[in-house]
Image (tube, helix red, strand yellow):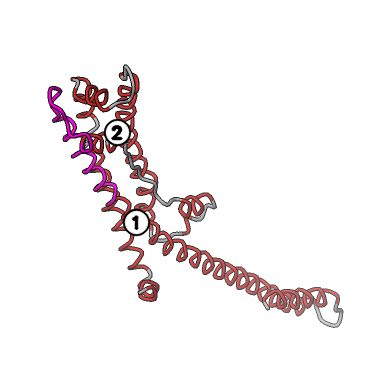
Amino acid sequence: MAEQEIAKHTKKVVQLMGKSEHGWRHKLGEMGLEIVTIVFAVSLSIWLHSLGEHRHEQQQVRAFLLGLRHDIGSDLDMIKELNQAHHEYDANFVYLGKFDPRATPDPQTFDAAYQRADSNYFFNPLVSRYQGFKSSGKLGHIENEALLDKILDLYERNTAAIKSSEGGWHSNQEIFRAYIENGLTGEDSLAERYRLITAPKGKRLLRKQITFPQLYERYNDYATLGAEIIKEIEHEYPEAVQEKK
């Protein structure tokens, strides 16, 4: 509609320039009016376009944040599972470390604990939605800067911190695995396993596998910040949250 008005008034300006029945003062006044009208129409068109574009951007932001709320919720469930799993691992390492090298263990009980010592579980957050929005350059469309800062911290800082701590824990597990593999002098028998586990080096490596307090702290930091982000998203879009219930 604005484009049609611009075309119409531009045509009028051209027609006025060709008319000879009016003096130049009269034509100049009419042309000035038409030009003002054109400028207004152009400005209105630009404003309407910007308004529509902004509305579309915010619709995308809304869809992204509501989806992110679901992703973070799933990640927080995983964090709970990881905390529980690592406490179980720790208890198992302590249990194995208490075996007396001179004793004879119950085969089933010892073997179950030995097998559990080889278990691991790592944080694998849902990041594809975040990475997609980030790579498309749309994160800047989030107008709530405090919320944006928290999202960036969660995915760029907290996730990396967890990966770093988990990497340290996994390195100790790999050292323990190498010790067992290289220490076997015969078949992988109960007696060989027990000998390696109850040796001074085996006990030392078991102690080193107990989860660092830092990793628990970083799991907790992620969970705390993630819960804050979910709360802020729900505050931004309360109607959408109600629809889901």
Residue drawn at x 63%, y 73% as measured from the top left: 40
5 or 38, nearer to the observer = 5
Determine whether, in the image, residue 76 is placed left or right of residue 200. Answer: right
Residue 138, compared with residue 173, is above or below; it is below
Query: Disc 1 on helix, strand or loop?
Result: helix
Please give the range of residues in magenta.
81-109
Question: Tag on residue 169?
Answer: 2
Q: Where is residue 148 in the image (x, y as percent from the top left)?
A: 39, 55
Quarter of the image for residue 37 reads bottom right
Disc 1 designates what residue?
Answer: 146
Q: What is the total number of numbered labels drawn onto the structure image? A: 2
Quarter of the image for residue 115 reads top left
Quarter in which the N terminus is drawn? bottom right
Q: Earlier in the sequence, mark 1 or mark 2?
A: 1
Quarter in which the C terminus is drawn? bottom left
Determine whether, in the image, residue 30 is placed left or right of residue 218. Answer: right
- Decide whether residue 82 is among the magenta residues: yes
157 or 99, nearer to the observer = 99
Q: Which residue lies furthest to the top in this view?
A: 185
Residue drawn at x 39%, y 44% as measured from the top left: 156
Q: Where is residue 87 in the image (x, y as percent from the top left)?
A: 21, 43
- Decide whether residue 178 is among the magenta residues: no
Label 1, label 2: how far apart the Cα atoms are: 33 Å
8 or 35, nearer to the observer = 8
- Neighbour class for label 2 at 10 Å: few (<14), some, many (≥20)? some
Residue 33, compared with residue 195, is above or below; it is below
Query: Disc 2 on helix, strand or loop?
Result: helix
Residue drawn at x 36%, y 52% as measured from the top left: 149
- Neighbour class for label 1 at 10 Å: few (<14), some, many (≥20)? few
Q: Which amino acid does label 2 sit on?
A: Trp
Q: Which amino acid does label 1 sit on?
A: Ala
Q: Position of residue 221 (x, y in %)?
A: 26, 48
